[in-house]
Image: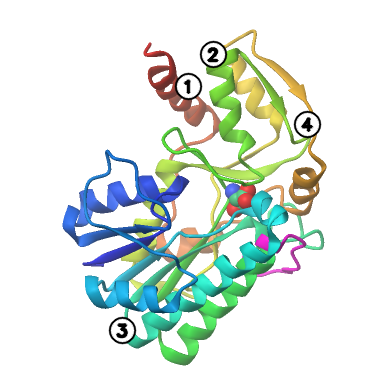
Amino acid sequence: MKRILVTGANGQIGVELTRILRDSYGRDNVIATDIKELPEDMDGPFRILDVRDANMVHEAMERTRADTIIHMAGILSAKGEEYPQLAWEINIQGIYNVLEVARIKEASVFFPSSIATFGPTTPARNTPQDTVQRPTSIYGISKVTGELLCDYYHIKYGVDVRGLRFPGLISHKALPGGGTTDYAVHIYYDAVKHGAYTCPISAGSYMDMMYMPDALDAVLQIMEADPRKFVHWNAFNTSAMSFDPEGIAAEIRRHIPDFEMRYEVNPVLQRIADSWPDSLDCTAAREEWGFNPRYDLTAMTDDMLKRLREKLTGE
Ligand code: SER
C-alpha cells in the first residue's frame, strides 16, 4: 500500500483507520472519502464520494492515483433492517464499483465482512471459517454477496482483494452507527455518564467482539501480509472475545460497583443477535497471516472506562 483511498472514512472504523494509516503511510498518501464531510480535526486529503456512483468512484481513483482502496462504506445490520433497499444499494453497488475500478486500475482492495454472514443454521459455537452461510438479515445477505464477489474478482481477474469478518467493534472515539452489537459501546458511555444502562439485547445472548485497536492492527496486518501463506484471501473470521450483556456488565462493576443494568429487549435486534454465532474459530486468520489480538474483555474494559472518563468527565 502506497497511496490509499478510504471509503466511509467518517464511520466508526473509518475515522480511526484513516488516522493510523496516515501515521504509517504519510498524511498525503491517504485520501479520506465519505458521503459526509469529516470532523474538523481530521486534517489531510478528503473527497466527497458516494460509492453507489460508479463514475464518482472511477474519478476518485483517477484523480488521486491511489493503488489501494480500503472500502469501509456500508450500512450495518440494524439500520439495514430499517432501510433494506438502501442497505442493498450501498453495500452491493459499493463493493461492485470498488472491485470494478480495482480490476481496471490494478489496485488492491480491503473488504470488511462480518459475523452477520452467518445465520441460524450455522454452527453457533466455535464457528468454522468455512461453513454454512444462510444469513437472515439484509446486511448479512449483502456481506455474503460481497465476500463471493471478492472471491470472483480474485479468481477471475487476479484482483488482490483481502478482507476480514469483523465481530462487533468497540471503541471510544467515533460512535458506531446502526449495528446490533452497538450496545457493547453504548453500555460504557452510559456507565460513565449515568451509572446505569438499558440494554436492548437479552441476557444470555453471546456475540463475538473486538476492541478497535486490535481491529485496526488486523487491517494493516492482512494488507501487508505475504500472500504466499494465504489459503483464503478474504472473509477471515476474526474475534477477540465473546460475551453476553451480563458478562460485560460484570466487568463494568469491577470499576463501578453500583452499575445498574436494565433490559428493554428490541425484538428486531434480538432476532439478529440470535441468528449470529456465539463464538468464532479464528484459526485460519492466525495461521495464514498471524492474527493476534491483544485485548480481552478485562483489558478492554479497563481501557474503555479510563478513556471515556477522560473524554466525558475530564477526570
Ligand atoms: N457490528 C456489526 C453490526 O452489528 C456487525 O458486523 O451490524
The residue indicated by pointer 1 is 305
Q: Closer to the N terminus: mark 2 or mark 4?
A: 4
Between 258 and 291, the residue placed more toward the observer is 258
176 within the magenta span? no
The residue indicated by pointer 4 is 203
Q: Closer to the N terminus: mark 3 or mark 4?
A: 3
Q: Which one is in front in this view, the residue at disc 2 or the one at disc 1?
A: 1
Q: Which one is in front in this view, the residue at disc 3 or the one at disc 4?
A: 3
What number is the disc on residue 105?
3
The answer to which image quadrant residue 106 occupies is bottom left
Mark 1: which amino acid? Leu
Mark 3: which amino acid? Lys
Disc 2 packing (10 Å; few <14; some 14–19; many ≥20): some
Between 90 and 238, the residue placed more toward the observer is 90
Residue 272: x and y in percent read 75, 51
For the magenta stretch, what is the residue range? 129-139
Q: Are marks 2 and 1 in contact (CB under 8 Å)?
A: yes
As helix, strand or loop, the secondary structure at mark 4 comes to loop
Q: In the drawing, does residue 210 fall left or right of residue 103?
A: right
Q: Residue at coordinates 79% horizontally, 48% vertically from top-left?
A: 274
Residue, far top: 258
Q: Closer to the N terminus: mark 1 or mark 4?
A: 4
